[in-house]
Image: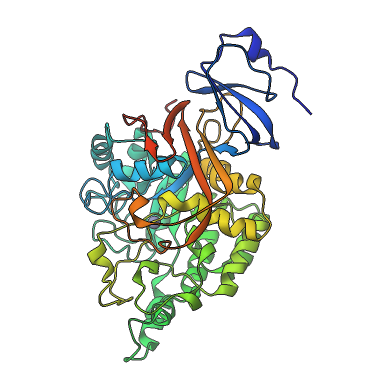
Amino acid sequence: MPNPPSPSASSAAPPDLIVRGKRVITPEGERAAAIHIRAGEIVAITAFDEIPPAIPVHDAGDSVVMPGIVDPHVHINEPGRTEWEGFSTATCAAAAGGVTTLIEMPLNSIPATTTAAAYREKLAAAAGKLSVDVGFWGGVVPGNVAELHALWDAGVFGFKCFLVPSGVDEFASVNEADLRAALPELASMSAPLLAHAELPGPIDDALAKLPKNAPPRHYATWLASRPHEAEDQAISLLIRLAREFKARVHVVHLASSDSLAQLRQGKADGVAITVETCPHYLSFAAEEIADGATEFKCAPPIRSRENREKLWAGLGDRTIDFIATDHSPCPPALKLADEGDFLRAWGGIASLQLSLPAVWTQARSRGYSVSRLAEWLCASPARLAGLDGRKGSIALGFDADLMVWNPDATFCVEATRLHHRHKVTPYAGCELAGVVETTFLRGRKIFERGEFSSSPAGHVLRRGVA
Ligand SMILES: [Zn+2]
C-alpha cells in the first residue's frame, strides 16, 4: 500500500536528489519507494511515483536500495604502518563495497590510539584522504586509565582492549585488574568496551600439549593452538564484569559457538553485552582450509563446519547482534605464503570490500531476507557506536548513505578488482552473489559500476558532533 504523502515532501524546499527503487529496505521492511534527499539528508520517503517535477532521479529499478553498510571493525594502520593499509586505499575499497561508515580500530597504527595526543595524530593522518565517513575507537591498555576521559571528550566512540597479546608491541593486553580499573570510568561515560575475547591460559595449555612435530603447514595445528575455551572463558569474565560494573561490553569477532549459550543468558539477565561475528567465520570451515593457506589465518581461528552453522543460528535468533569484517591486512610477505607456516604468519583477513557479497551468498542459501542482512550490516552496528539516529537506516532525518546492489548477480572475486592496498584474501576465486552498483554518501554519488567520484567526500565522525 502506498504511503500517504509526507508533509515535508510538499511543504518544505524541494529535494535536490531522489533515489527510488522497487526494493527499498526501510526499518519497516522492503517496499517500492522514493527517497527524497536534501543537503545530504533523507527528508521524505514517499511512494515510488510520488516525485516532484524537475528533480534529478536515480532509478534503481529492480535492484535493492539498502542503507550504506556500517562496519565498526576495521584496521587501517595509518599512520605508522601505512604500508599495510591506509586511509585512501581502505576507504576506496569501502566505497566500492557499499560501506559508507567505518569505525577504525586503535591498534596496528603507530602510535596506537591510546592517548588524546595519538588520536589527534590519527585525525591529521586521515585528513583529505577519506572516501567514506570514518570514526575512531580509542584503546584501553595497562596504565592509560587517566587518558580515557580525554579520548572520549575528543570524540572516540568507545574503547577496544585485548585479553591476549595483540600481535603488536604498541598495544599491550589487559588483565582483570586492568579492566577493574578502567570499567568504572567507562561506565560513568556510558562508553562501550570492545574486547578481543581470548584468555592466555587455555592457549598456553594448548600450546604445551601440541606435539613437537605438529606440522605448522596444517590448519589443524593452528586450530588446536587456539581452543574455543580461550574464547569461552574470556566471555564469561566479560559478562561477569559487565554485570558488576553496569558497563557496556561488546565482544568482537566471536568464533566459538560454545559461547552462544552464556551470551544469550547474559542478555536475558539484562547485562549490557553485545556481540559481533565476521564474514569469514560465516563463510569458511576448518575442514576445508588447505595446508599452507595462511590467507585464512586469523585469531580466534575459523572453526569447524558445525560451529559455523551454530553461528548462523545465533544470528538467526539474535544472540549475535551484527556482522563486522575485522578487515586486518598486512604486506603479503608477512603471510609467509612460501612456507605456509600457520603459527608464524601474521593473523588477519582482508575483506572490507567484500562483506556484502560474502555474507549475502551464505545468508540467502539459508533462507534469510535482505532485510535481515540490513539489520546485521547496517542498523545494528550503528547502534554500537551510538550512530543509530543518523547512520544505518533509510529513515527521515538520517544521512542519505545508500547502496544500490543486485542480489541475483554473481561474480568471481579477482584480486585485481580489490581496492585494498594488498590483494591477499581468502575470498580470491570465490563465486559470490550480490554486486554493488552504486554507493551514495550523504546524497553524493561516490561510486558507480567500478568508477569513483573524483574527490574524497568522506568526513571524520566524532562522537557528539553532528
Ligand atoms: Zn580486529
Ligand 1, by image quadrant, is bottom left
Quadrant of the frame with the C terminus: top left
Q: Is residue 370 left or right of residue 415?
A: right
Q: How is the image coloured?
A: rainbow
Instruction: Give the residue at x 40% y 67%.
Output: 299
Q: Is residue 240 visible?
A: yes
User: Percent x, y for residue 437?
Assistant: 49, 40
Q: Name the foreground residue: 399 vs 57.
A: 57
User: Percent x, y for residue 161?
Assistant: 38, 55
Q: Is residue 408 left or right of residue 216?
A: right
Q: Is residue 208 left or right of residue 251?
A: left
24 to 221, vertically: above or below: above
10 to 419, vertically: above or below: above
Q: Is residue 276 visible?
A: no
Q: Is residue 455 left or right of residue 191?
A: left
Q: Name the foreground residue: 449 vs 397.
A: 449
Quadrant of the frame with the N terminus: top right
Instruction: Give the residue at x 48% y 36%.
Output: 438
185 to 51, vertically: above or below: below
Q: Quadrant of residue 389?
A: top right
Instruction: Give the residue at x 39% y 63%.
Output: 163
Q: Name the foreground residue: 96 vs 195.
A: 96
Q: Quadrant of residue 457?
A: top left
Q: How many labels were placed on the picture?
A: 0
User: Percent x, y for residue 146?
Assistant: 31, 44
User: Percent x, y for residue 14?
Assistant: 56, 11
